[in-house]
Image (cartoon, rainbow, N blue to C red):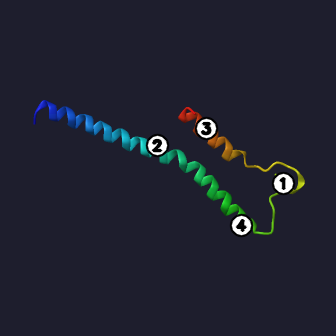
């Protein structure tokens, strides 16, 4: 094995490692919102179809409590530099 091949192997290895860590990071940043959404779905199913939530009832002119998703989106855009 020549020095050229060794250098290319090292560069390729670090490139693959960087790609793997980036993909793992992307997956891990999406897990918490998915868990929160799943809990919200379970709570809605547990409460029943006919029962409405106590807070944030749009039929009474109160704002809905969906700011958590907006905050997650804003943080994601900030981290990407948009």
Q: Are marks 1 and 2 in contact (CB under 8 Å)?
A: no
Q: Which residue is mark 2?
A: 25
Frontmost residue, 46 versus 71? 71
State left or right for residue 66 relative to residue 11. Answer: right
Mark 1 or 4, closer to the camera: 1
Whether 2 is drawn above or below 41: the answer is above
Q: Residue furthest left?
A: 1
- Element type where label 3 sits in the image: helix
Q: Residue furthest front?
A: 82
Q: Which residue is mark 4?
A: 46
Between disc 3 and disc 4, whose residue precedes?
4
Pointer 3 local density, CA inside 10 Å: few below 14, some 14–19, many at least 20: few
Write the residue at 88% across / 51% down.
61
Q: Are marks 2 and 4 in contact (CB under 8 Å)?
A: no
Write the residue at 10% across / 36% down.
1
**How far separated are the C-alphas under marks 3 and 4?**
30 Å
Write the residue at 20% across / 32% down.
7
Name the mark on residue 58: 1
Q: Which residue is mark 3?
A: 75
**How far separated are the C-alphas under marks 1 and 4?**
21 Å
Mark 1 or 2, closer to the camera: 1
State left or right for residue 28 relative to residue 56. Answer: left
**How far separated are the C-alphas under marks 1 and 2?**
37 Å
Q: Return the x and y of residue 48 as percentages of the image width and height.
A: 75, 68
């Amino acid at each position: 094995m020549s020095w050229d091949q060794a250098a290319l192997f090292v560069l390729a290895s670090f490139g693959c490692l960087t790609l793997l860590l980036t993909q793992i990071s992307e997956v891990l940043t999406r897990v918490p919102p998915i868990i929160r959404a799943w809990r919200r779905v379970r709570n809605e199913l547990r409460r029943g179809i006919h029962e409405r939530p106590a807070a944030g009832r749009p039929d009474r002119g109160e704002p809905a409590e969906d700011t958590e998703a907006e905050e997650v989106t804003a943080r994601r855009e900030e981290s990407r530099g948009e």
